[in-house]
Amino acid sequence: MSLSKWRKIRAFTVFSCIVTFTTFLFSYTLRDPSLYFFKYAIRKSDSFFSKGQCGCRQCMTELEDDPWFTERFNLSVHPLMSRRNSLLTDDTYRWWQWLQAEQEPANFSEVVEKLFQVIPDADLYMDAGPERCRTCAVVGNSGNLKGSHYGALIDSSDVIIRMNMAPTSGYEEDVGSRTTHHVMYPESAIDLDNTTSLLLIPFKTLDLQWITSALTTGSIKHTYIPVQSRIKANKNRVLIYSPTFFKYVYDAWLESHGRYPSTGFLSLLFSIHICDKVSVYGFGADQYGNWHHYWEENHQGGAFRHTGVHDADYEYNVTLLLADKHKIKIFKGF
Ligand SMILES: *[C@@H]1O[C@H](CO)[C@@H](O)[C@H](O)[C@H]1NC(C)=O
Ligand SMILES: *[C@@H]1O[C@H](CO)[C@@H](O)[C@H](O)[C@H]1NC(C)=O
Ligand SMILES: *[C@@H]1O[C@H](CO)[C@@H](O)[C@H](O)[C@H]1NC(C)=O
Ligand SMILES: *[C@@H]1O[C@H](CO)[C@@H](O)[C@H](O)[C@H]1NC(C)=O
């Protein structure tokens, strides 16, 4: 074989290799403009550093997780109600109706259908993955927030959850001013601004009828006590706490202690399911052992501790365990 012929063959081989490779790449790119192949390679190298469960340094679920936590945590129970998951098992429905012993409840599925004609039906926040690092602040109402200067720290979170009658106006220095989610039930409802999501915890079928009414006709004015007949809130941001998730919190996390979980505990479990990093503020008593709200004067005697409905000690134990296992961070206040 002459030298020039050899060179020609070699040149042709190199040339056809290049053509084959670029054709492959080109058709790959056409088929998948997102260049999945390269993204995948980059993501793989990222997750090598971040361990891959989420985009934060530490994630709610880790590869080598604590058995106490994995035994209880079930990511496939969705915290928010949608049309799709609204169907309750007989067991769940019976338990849920028993909570406030509603007499002659309306037809549940008809009530749910009417509700989702008023509020959006979306499966939100179930987007955990290697790119997400969602930070959340769960702000309880304890007097231990007074003088804490946590305001700026709370406001720096992506998600800020407050509950029941909690005001921010006049307390910004200690509790912050932003609220992305305000958790309430009809008997504890307050008006919101239109950037905040109202997260309703329903305890009975009437509560679902109430929110539908409060956003439209205002016809329901009474549950077991008089309630706000109308509520100021952005209808496009109203969310419903799922009764199935409610029961999961009670069964798996409280092991049936107390009659049902408190708003604070329900909010905490909500955040554990939708966030990667959870900070807890305003839970527990103040430095003198008093249980009161940060916006009220300090009454001696601990009126909120033993309501007979919640097992505050057991809930607090579970909350402390979550902190021990680095799933949440508790800011104790003053
Ligand atoms: C988690 O929840 C799903 C949906 O409710 C259920 O089917 C599954 O059995 C649960 N897993 C565990 C380990 O309890
Ligand atoms: C509730 O309403 C639905 C649809 O109208 C109906 O199919 C269902 O049988 C009703 N359930 C009860 C318990 O009456
Ligand atoms: C929210 O309120 C602001 C002013 O209060 C108003 O300009 C805006 O249009 C409202 N947005 C919605 C979606 O209602
Ligand atoms: C809380 O935990 C402590 C120590 O683990 C235990 O002694 C106590 O009985 C627990 N309290 C409740 C109400 O479960």
Image (cartoon, grey):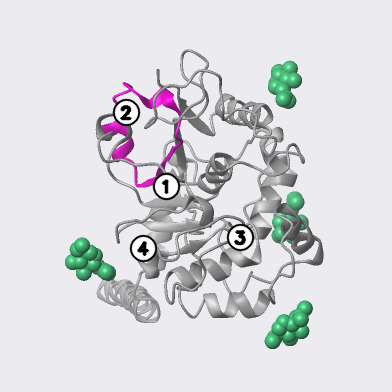
Whether tag 4 and tag 3 are in contact, CB under 8 A, the answer is no
| Rendered image: mark on residue 242 | 3
Q: Earlier in the sequence, mark 1 or mark 3?
A: 1
Point out residue 203 in the picture as x, y percentages from the top left corner: 64, 57
> With 118 as the anchor, is 67 left or right in this view?
right
Counting other residues with Cα less than 10 Å from the Cα at mark 4, is it few (<14), some (14-19), or many (20 or more)? some
Helix, strand or loop under label 4: loop
Residue 38 placement, left or right of 127: left
In the displayed structure, does residue 259 sit left or right of residue 207? right
Point out the residue furthest to the right here: 91
User: Label 2 near label 3: C-beta < 8 Å?
Assistant: no
| 316 inside magenta stretch | no
Q: Position of residue 205 (x, y in %)?
A: 65, 67
Q: Quadrant of residue 73?
A: top right
Which residue is label 1 attached to? 45
Tell me the SS state at disc 2: loop
Give the number of the disc on residue 150.
Answer: 2
The residues colored magenta run: 132-161
Q: Dot 2: few (<14), some (14–19), or many (≥20) neighbours within 10 Å?
A: some
Q: Secondary structure at mark 1?
A: helix
How many numbered circles does the render carry? Answer: 4
Q: CA distance from mark 2 to mark 1?
A: 37 Å
The amino acid sitting under disc 4 is Ala
Ranked by sequence position, the earlier of labels 4 and 3 is 4
Mark 4 to mark 1: distance in Å? 44 Å
- Sequence-earlier tag: 4 or 1: 1
Residue kind at label 2, given as amino acid type? Tyr
Identify the residue position indicated by label 4 in the image: 233
- Mark found first going from the N terminus, 3 or 2: 2
